[in-house]
Image (cartoon, grey):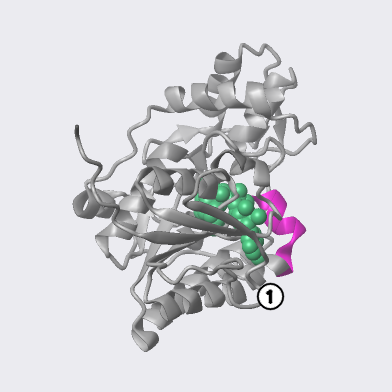
């Protein structure tokens, strides 16, 4: 009988663990033998995303807003936390534009509370940052040493600047408090458990296609996106956590697809004949965004492996079975 390898971490706290990425992270940690405390205020996440994990003795869900005080770990708070994965933050344009102040709060005060938890437990801390720290980039593809091109007073600034502040705070806790920190910069990710009305490109297109509506393509659709399937991203996050690397490290799929191509593939994958409808480009919408993932390849031996059309097929299948959102939102 083959023995399961010892888990890299004993117990992880995942802030934002009931969200899209967080719920897949919780699942993967449990599979690897790591116990999980998921702390989430369910503002953009949902208990349903982790409902299947609740019976697992290694899993606990604590409903709390981490901006309100120290990160709570539940009634019988475990002492053996050795990893804090900080994912809590509105992440889609619809969510962060609806809650701009809360977005800045969770990036600043919330990140501070998560860092303080890691410090008090002597745990490794990993910040889920974003490609949005590069803003509308002037270089392609983006490497980690590019400082970015962000409009600090633009409509997306609440998210971009919150994450830039989070990165600075994380770096300060490493230098000033000796916390073992790491930063990953996540590029557009898609997959099951996204919400069809969250304004992000893939779920918006899939929802529209399944509803028989035309897909709303911003501008002429020639702007490109690189999209990573969620299982690949989660593998990268956990490998990064185990590596002890400080980052920042890009995680994403460098394959570039135009928004028009994505729309075409979604129509094909869903069998929709409703076609596309063009809408205005949102202000400060990046024209092009593509990760340079050389660092992740060198350090972790990681790369996104799921082909786009395969990931899309799994996503469509999930949406057919689960998603019932119908609110109209243009694709970002
Ligand atoms: P999501 O909205 O599905 O998940 C975020 C989770 O954080 C939600 O469950 C929400 O309820 C929770 N949350 C928000 N504010 C909170 C607070 N104050 N206290 C406790 N919980 C709070 O988004 P996601 O796509 O899963 O993103 C997860 C993380 O990854 C975010 O930090 C996001 O910035 C980052 N990221 C995601 C992508 C992507 O393409 N999905 C890209 C770049 C970065």
Which quarter of the image is occupied by the N terminus?
top left
Q: Residue at x 37, y 67 (%)?
A: 82
Measured from the top left, where is residue 137 in percent x and y? 46, 56
129 vs 70: above or below? above
Q: In this view, does 204 lie to the left or right of 112?
A: right
Question: Is ligand 1 less than 8 Å from the beta carbon at label 1?
Answer: yes
Residue 90, image quadrant: bottom right
Q: Residue at x 72, y 57 (%)?
A: 97
Q: In this view, does 146 lie to the left or right of 69?
A: left
Count the numbered circles shown.
Answer: 1
What kind of secondary structure does the magenta stretch mostly adopt?
Answer: helix
Question: What residue is disc 1 on?
Answer: 68
Q: Which of 24 and 135 is in front in this view?
A: 24
Q: Nearer the viewer, residue 136 or 31?
A: 31
Residue 174, image quadrant: bottom left
Q: Which residue is drawn at 41% across and 76% down?
A: 121
Measured from the top left, where is residue 61 in percent x and y? 60, 55
Q: What stretch is highlighted in magenta?
A: 92-101
172 vs 243: above or below? below
Q: Residue at x 35, y 52 (%)?
A: 238
Residue 43, magenta (yes or no): no
70 vs 74: above or below? below
Which quarter of the image is occupied by the C terminus?
top right
The answer to whether residue 287 of the structure is visible from this angle is no
Measured from the top left, where is residue 36 in percent x and y? 47, 55
- Secondary structure, mark 1, is loop
316 vs 59: above or below? above
Measured from the top left, where is residue 243 in percent x and y? 25, 59
Q: Where's ligand 1: which quadrant?
A: bottom right
Residue 98, magenta (yes or no): yes
């Amino acid at each position: 009988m083959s023995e399961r390898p010892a888990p890299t971490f004993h117990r992880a706290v995942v802030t934002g663990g009931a969200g899209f990425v967080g719920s897949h992270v919780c699942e993967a940690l449990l599979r690897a033998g790591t116990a999980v405390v998921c702390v989430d205020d369910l503002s953009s996440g949902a208990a349903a995303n982790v409902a299947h994990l609740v019976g697992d003795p290694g899993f606990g869900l604590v409903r709390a807003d981490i901006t309100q005080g120290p990160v709570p770990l539940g009634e019988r708070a475990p002492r053996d936390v050795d990893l804090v994965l900080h994912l809590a933050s509105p992440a889609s344009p619809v969510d962060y534009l609806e809650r701009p102040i809360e977005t800045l709060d969770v990036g600043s005060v919330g990140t501070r509370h998560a860092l303080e938890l890691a410090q008090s437990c002597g745990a490794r801390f990993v910040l889920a940052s974003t490609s949005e720290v590069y803003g509308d980039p002037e270089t392609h593809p983006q490497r980690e040493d590019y400082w970015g091109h962000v409009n600090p007073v633009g409509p997306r600034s609440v998210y971009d600047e919150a994450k830039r502040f989070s990165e600075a705070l994380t770096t300060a806790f490493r230098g000033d408090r000796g916390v073992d920190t790491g930063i990953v910069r996540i590029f557009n990710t898609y997959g099951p458990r996204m919400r069809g009305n969250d304004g992000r490109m893939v779920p918006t297109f899939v929802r529209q296609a399944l509803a028989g509506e035309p897909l709303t393509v911003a501008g002429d659709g020639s702007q490109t996106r690189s999209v990573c399937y969620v299982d690949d991203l989660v593998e990268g996050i956990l490998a990064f956590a185990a590596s002890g690397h400080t980052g920042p490290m890009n995680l994403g799929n460098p394959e570039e697809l135009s928004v028009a191509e994505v729309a075409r593939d979604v129509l094909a994958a869903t069998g929709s004949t409703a076609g596309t409808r063009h809408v205005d480009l949102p202000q400060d919408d990046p024209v092009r965004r593509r990760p340079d993932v050389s660092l992740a390849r060198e350090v972790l031996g990681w790369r996104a492996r799921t082909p786009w059309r395969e990931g899309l097929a799994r996503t469509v299948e999930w949406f057919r079975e689960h998603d019932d959102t119908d609110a109209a939102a243009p694709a970002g």
